[in-house]
Image (cartoon, rainbow, N blue to C red):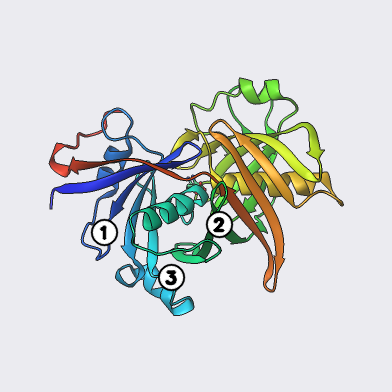
Amino acid sequence: MTKINFTKGHGTGNDFVLVLDADGEINLTQEQIAQICDRHFGIGADGFIRVIKSVNHPDGQAILAEEPNAVWFMDYYNADGSTAEMCGNGTRVFARYLTQRGLVELADGETLSIGTRAGVKDLQRNMSGFAVDIGRWKLDGAEALIHTDGLEVARPGIGINVGNPHYVVALASGRELADLDLHEAPGIEPAPENGANVEFVVPAEPMIKDGVGHINMRVYERGVGETLSCGTGICAAALATRHWAGAGAPNIWQVRVPGGVLGVRMFATEDGEHVGLSGAAELVYDGQLDLNQLKSVVR
Ligand SMILES: N[C@@H](CCC[C@H](N)C(=O)O)C(=O)O
């Protein structure tokens, strides 16, 4: 099979190529995925999502033992072809794809459970698009020093895991945020074994309005580069800012990224505090790609 149908979608500008492969018959190499995601030699995307039935994916089979309703599995890859455990915007675009293509019926108020490498994620349709329960979060290791072009001195970053790894760095002003040069991956010391996504945040003015926290953020995604939005990064940034703000800080946040604004909420559950993400999730076009025509990415 050399010709593959695909759909292009995005969540606040974090864009994905989605390929339906319910039966698990399409096995692309890391190089082919990188070629597809390349913005000059391929379609161009921040990530590649294989839409596969859980029963046909090894990680999906483990998911089914936990949640038999998680019929579909989000097989997620970064633009460089590496796998990632989770993608917050990806889950919401995945839900849009399943419902818009009629693969899943989802009435308002109903929950859609999907499988990911970071476990089962529950989604619901809402006013802004789709909301996802990202699940439990945790502080990840000791602080690291982050340095990147545009910052005169390295800054401390707080490690937060929301299924995938992040470091969040607080900056002093909007000017400092705007002046960052994120063409190269930020340095992280000590370097995490499997890399990490890095978020730079600045509080909005005022930071808290009517009980809602507001921050501005830019992100460098592991395996991708700077992106217009990163759902899990947005959750990590809101969690870090609440931590820095101390007692009395809100559990509802709005995070502005170059691609738009997403909502974050932290809420108690029987198994500990969860973090949720909501915002737009759109499909923009369909096409067909010919694997034989993919060109090597010259870099
Ligand atoms: N864009 C994503 C995160 C995608 C994975 C990330 N690059 C990683 O390697 O962990 C999101 O919306 O969360």
Q: Residues within 10 Å of mark 2 (few under 14, many from 20)?
A: many
- Residue 289, image x, y percentages: 20, 41
User: Which amino acid type is marked by label 1?
Assistant: Asp
Q: Going by the image, does 189 lie left or right of 107?
A: right
Q: Quadrant of residue 10?
A: top left
Instruction: Tell me, yes or no, if residue 298 can be seen here.
Output: yes
- Residue 122, image x, y percentages: 53, 64
Query: How many angstroms separate mark 2 from mark 3 (CA)?
Result: 14 Å
Residue occupied by mark 2: 132
Tags 2 and 3 in contact by the CB under 8 Å rule?
Answer: no
Classify mark 1: helix, strand or loop: loop
Query: How many angstroms separate mark 1 from mark 3 (CA)?
Result: 16 Å
Badge 1 or badge 3: first in the primary sequence: 1
Query: How many angstroms separate mark 1 from mark 2 (CA)?
Result: 23 Å
User: Which amino acid type is marked by label 3?
Assistant: Ala
Badge 2 or badge 3: first in the primary sequence: 3
Q: Residues within 10 Å of mark 1 (few under 14, many from 20)?
A: some
Q: Between residues 89 and 60, which one lies in front from this camera angle?
A: 89
Classify mark 3: helix, strand or loop: loop
**Eyeballing the image, is 100 above or below 32?**
below
Q: Is mark 1 within 8 Å of ligand 1?
A: no
Q: Between residues 219 and 72, which one lies in front from this camera angle?
A: 72
Residue shown at 69%/74% (left/top)? 270
